[in-house]
Structure formats: C-alpha cells, structure tokens
C-alpha cells in the first residue's frame, strides 16, 4: 500500500525510479548468479525470482501508466 501511495503522489517519478532501480539491481545480481552456475534447486529458485523481478518491473510501469 505504501508503494501505491508513493506512485500516486507528487514525487511519483522519483518513486518509480527508486523502485525500478532496485528491481534492475536485483535482476542483475540474479543474472550474474545464474550465469556463474548454481545447483539445480537453487538455479530454479533463482530463475523464478529473476522472472518475478522482471514481471514486477512491468507491473510497476503499468501502475504508473494507469495512474496518469
């Protein structure tokens, strides 16, 4: 709920950048781990988390677009 308030507030652009930067950084860390190689169970969890971060970025953009 706090994120939604931030994204609807007057500092929306700064909030979008903040959350997008966090998701980009998370995605980069996950990609790095996947590229290095992980045990099968960890690899699958990491892959799913990377996909979730990607989807979260898309949802963030949709939230902002719909708020305009």
Image (spheres, rainbow, N blue to C red):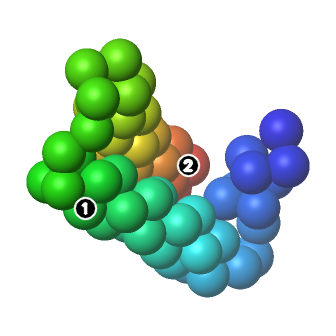
**Residue that appears at 29% across and 54% down:** 33
Secondary structure beneath label 1? helix
Which residue is outermost to the front? 39
Residue 17 picture location, percent across and down: 51, 76
**Residue that appears at 61% across and 81% down:** 14
Q: Nearer the viewer, residue 24 or 30?
A: 30
Residue 19 picture location, percent across and down: 57, 64
The reply to whether the C-beta atoms of the residues labelled 1 and 2 are less than 8 Å apart is no
The residue identified by callout 2 is 67
Sequence-first disc among 1 and 2: 1
Mark 2 residue crowding within 10 angstroms, few (<14) / some (14–19) / many (20+) = few
Left or right of 64, for residue 14: right
**Residue that appears at 67% across and 59% down:** 7
**Residue that appears at 53% across and 66% down:** 22
Taking 4 as reference, is 12 above or below it? below
Left or right of 64, for residue 55: left
Q: Is residue 10 visible?
A: yes
**Quarter of the rendering containing residue 29:** bottom left
**Quarter of the rendering containing residue 39:** top left
Left or right of 25, for residue 33: left
Q: Is residue 16 visible?
A: no
Left or right of 37, for residue 17: right
Mark 1 residue crowding within 10 angstroms, few (<14) / some (14–19) / many (20+) = few
How far apart are the alpha carbons under marks 1 and 2? 34 Å
The number of discs equals 2
Which quarter of the image is occupied by the N terminus?
top right
Q: Nearer the viewer, mark 1 or mark 2?
A: 1
Which residue is outermost to the right? 2
The residue identified by callout 1 is 32
């Amino acid at each position: 709920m706090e994120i939604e308030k931030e994204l609807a507030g007057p500092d929306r652009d700064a909030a979008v950048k903040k959350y997008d930067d966090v998701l980009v950084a998370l995605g980069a860390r996950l990609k790095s781990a996947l590229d290095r190689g992980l045990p099968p169970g960890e690899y699958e969890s990491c892959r799913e988390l990377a996909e979730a971060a990607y989807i979260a970025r898309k949802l963030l953009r949709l939230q902002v677009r719909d708020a305009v």
